[in-house]
Amino acid sequence: MENLKVTIKDIAAVAGVSHSTVSRALNDSPQISPGTKDKIKDIARAMNFEFNAGARSLSGRKTGNIAVVYQAKYDQFGSSLYVSQLFIELRHFLERMDMDVILLEGYHPETGASNISRLLRQQKVDGFLIVHNLITKRDYDSIQRAGLPVVQLHMSPVFCQKEELDYFFTDNFMGGRLATEHLISRGCRRILTIPTNDFDSEEFKQRTAGYKQALKDNGIQFEEELVVGIDSTYLKGYQLFNSIPEILANVDGIFFQTDIQAFGFLTAARERGIRIPEDLKVIGFDDAPICESTIPQLTTIHQPRRKLAELACNRIIDLISKRNNESRIQEVLFPHIVIRESS
Amino acid sequence: MENLKVTIKDIAAVAGVSHSTVSRALNDSPQISPGTKDKIKDIARAMNFEFNAGARSLSGRKTGNIAVVYQAKYDQFGSSLYVSQLFIELRHFLERMDMDVILLEGYHPETGASNISRLLRQQKVDGFLIVHNLITKRDYDSIQRAGLPVVQLHMSPVFCQKEELDYFFTDNFMGGRLATEHLISRGCRRILTIPTNDFDSEEFKQRTAGYKQALKDNGIQFEEELVVGIDSTYLKGYQLFNSIPEILANVDGIFFQTDIQAFGFLTAARERGIRIPEDLKVIGFDDAPICESTIPQLTTIHQPRRKLAELACNRIIDLISKRNNESRIQEVLFPHIVIRESS
DNA sequence: TTGTAAGCGTTATCAA
DNA sequence: TTGATAACGCTTACAA
């Protein structure tokens, strides 16, 4: 059984070279001859060698850790659906790049202390992947002063010009527009949209803006009363018939801005004998796994979470390696519609 | 604006002492006089000092990281409900103890390479919190040989005698028994139980065993056909009327072994005009947040996830500090029933 | 192409 | 009670 705690010195001893040669070989330095390099790599593999993370980070190299900073409020059921899917994808790609994920909240829930600042001082991570819209300007500045890369994901920062960051978002405006266009193309003329109350973040405003644009493009008058925010939960969706019966009575399409709301609503509709999509057409947003479980299956806007995660991970790895870091890379990905049965 | 990268030497310079005095003071060594200790701590606070994690781990052996090892299959919607709640609690407690969480799968999904073995070699963590039942004996051994603590949480290990580990589980047998007793006390005599097909782990067998015990205690004959495994999803619960109509017709109570199955079932029942709890009583398991969203609200068995997380975190911190580590601590917590409307 | 040696920030050992 | 100093495992000038 091979030893734990193999060091480059152990390898050096076996290979009959100095430990710096081993270091260079394993780091693929061009200075080392192919012959010795291969020999050393073979020995390292055979001895099941891994670099000591602490030593590596001390001597000015890399920690092999990425901080994924999130907001605790996304831990709720319902809202968590999309974000937790995104995290799965992030880990998937980072693992392939031999990076570990330190997953944490931006700020201590009680003291408010910044975890970003702490990690920076502790020098525990090589970069920050931020899925949080309320990071302070001060923290963004600290990261930059420390020379570490940041990639903003999923949501726009509130306290920082997004132009200053590398970011990857879904085009929520297009998503809202797409959803609404789809309903219109299915013959809807009075379309209700349901943003969320519990998250006041930019993305829902964008979706609503896209909704308005689609109406306008199709010569449909926008009506303020057809925008009704509810919490992003199954139950609120289910109770919609109770909370706004008059509005629902005069509507032929609903664009729910999260799938879970639509899920609750579809159930209530079925119980009331309202036929979906015949009597009323419904579309959601996110393409969470539950969409296929609803009855009828929910038409929705797919957020390109895998692609987003892939881009963000590739980008942060590039930035860590100082590749193409002269300018920011900012992408806003088009979502696409997934047509199922509810429309 | 205070500097990032403050070292103990910087503090030493300001305080007019040696860096080793600073190290001792900040580590609360009893050798340092209260006066200098306070002075040094004040300076450290003022300079916003944090220990360099790499250096610390190189020198002593504290990384300030705990690995939380999980199984990707728990990332699915439905099954994730309970486990992701548990992770939230774990982070909650570990954060309070100034520990960061490295969250990762036990094994590389493609290569099968062990992340545990890698972390051990890299010396990246101070301990392992394992929420995974298929960790190899070899990996448990490696952890032990490395002298690091392991705490097993939520599920029994398959490849390791659980007696060898510190663990904290829910008493699934009692849970199954409690659930069944409750239905019996409500007058049910023909009780169906629904374990899961998609997770073959021990916990469901235990719940079923508890179910049997309760029947026996109450003089009710166990019938094989009243144990019907389905996947742990909303849809499978919903479709139960289609898949086993004859069985359902002759049953007066159902014990679903996950809440999400019950959720789907309740919806289907409502649509069929079956009154819950009048015609049929239903109980779930887990006490996931959705339980309050179901109609009627779901009676369920509450798994003490917060308590479990707290015990596990306290225990691993103790073990890291070499406190009370002569013997294993193993607790199996009683779940309790949460009676809502479905029974 | 490879080796020697300094240095990263901390803890721990030994002296004082 | 405190200070020098070595050591942890690695990277990286600088030398050879």
Image (cartoon, coloured by chain):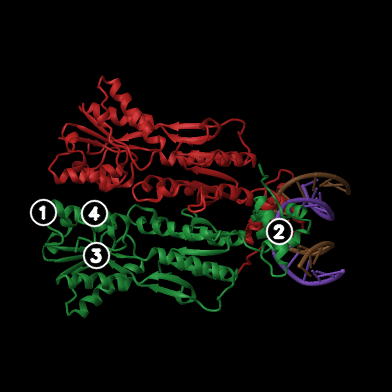
Chain colours: A green, B red, C brown, D purple
Q: Residue at x 30, y 45 (%)?
A: B260
Are discs 3 and 1 less than 8 Å apart at CB?
A: no
What amino acid type should be assigned to the residue bearing mark 3? Answer: Ile
Same chain shared by disc 2 and disc 4? yes
Q: Is residue A254 above or below residue A236?
A: below
Q: Residue at x 19, y 41 (%)?
A: B241
> Of circles 4 and 3, which is in front?
3
Residue D4, percent across and down? 84, 55
What amino acid type should be assigned to the residue bearing mark 2? Answer: Lys
Residue A39 has which mark?
2
> Of circles 1 and 2, which is in front?
2
Q: Chain of mark 1?
A: A
Relative to B194, B168 lies left or right: right
Same chain shared by disc 2 and disc 3? yes
Labels 4 and 3: the sequence-earlier one: 4
Q: Is residue B21 above or below residue A196?
A: above
> Of circles 2 and 3, which is in front?
2
Separation of disc 2 and disc 4 at Cα?
58 Å
Residue A158, percent across and down? 42, 70
What amino acid type should be assigned to the residue bearing mark 4? Answer: Thr
Residue A339 has which mark?
3
Quarter of the rendering containing residue A282: bottom left
> Of circles 3 and 1, which is in front?
3
SS state under label 1? loop
Which residue is denoted by mark 4 in the rendering?
A: A294
Labels 3 and 1: the sequence-earlier one: 1
> Of circles 2 and 4, which is in front?
2
Residue B62, percent across and down? 64, 48
Labels 1 and 2: the sequence-earlier one: 2
Labels 2 and 4: the sequence-earlier one: 2
SS state under label 4? loop
